[in-house]
Image: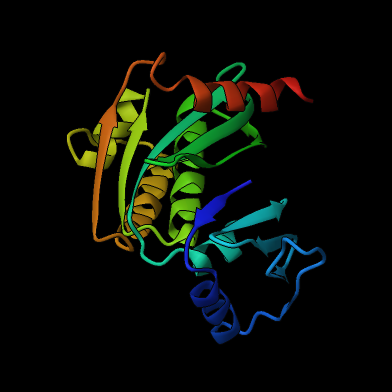
Amino acid sequence: MPVIECDVDAARDRLEQAGVSVETGNTDHERWRASRGNATAIAYDDKVVIQGGTPRDLEALLREDGGRAHVYFDGAARGNPGPAAIGWVIVTGDGIVAEGSERIGRATNNQAEYEALVAALEAARDYGYDEVHLRGDSELIVKQVRGEYDTNDPELREKRVTVHELLAAFDEWTIEHVPREVNDRADGLANEALDAA
């Protein structure tokens, strides 16, 4: 549940300019509330709280500037190939902004890693960040994205192209390999999605 500390009158103006209908709050403490898709933004005196299953669209409209995010990603496959899932986490100075996970069907571990990276980049783009610092525990994927390794696998090559297309939307980006312990939240999300079947 994202909490955005901001000028709530300016936030209301941004929503209205984007065509989002803003209504009076339901209680004495609520200044206003606005809904889009499966999310509702509720304004208080100095902050907006976003509730619901898909807060991304509203949050992207409410953030005053893009800013920088650290993005963790991980893919998991049981068998190679086998049932697979992804997990990702977006972190800023305010803590965890968003996280996600899902089963992606049958894939190799490397395919799942790329799918996790694509999903994480799409989320960071939708939130409106202009600088992303990516961290994953797959050295192969990190080095392929940086151009240090090539791949003979056509599917992985295609996924790498997709990643670079998404990266082009950001003013600045980095990607680094980190130990699994540093990537434990994204790893845990991917494995929880696999276990939930």
Work out which residue is located at the far front of the displayed protein and give it: 28
The colour scheme of the drawn protein is rainbow
| Residue 106, horizontal then vertical, whole percent | 65, 31
> Viewer-proximal residue, 23 or 146?
23
Work out which residue is located at the far left of the displayed protein and give it: 148
| Residue 27, horizontal then vertical, whole percent | 81, 63
Q: Residue at x 57, y 33 (%)?
A: 86
In-image side of 168 versus 182 (left or right) = left
In-image side of 106 versus 60 (left or right) = right
Q: Residue at x 51, y 36 (%)?
A: 88
Q: How many marks?
A: 0
Residue 59 occupies quadrant: bottom right
Residue 54 visible in the snapshot: no
| Residue 64, horizontal then vertical, whole percent | 41, 67
> Viewer-proximal residue, 97 or 149?
97
Q: Residue at x 32, y 59 (%)?
A: 130
| Residue 82, horizontal then vertical, whole percent | 63, 23
> Viewer-proximal residue, 159 or 151?
159
Residue 6 visible in the snapshot: yes
Quadrant of image for the C terminus? top right
Residue 93 occupies quadrant: top left
Check the image and report above or below for 65 versus 164: below
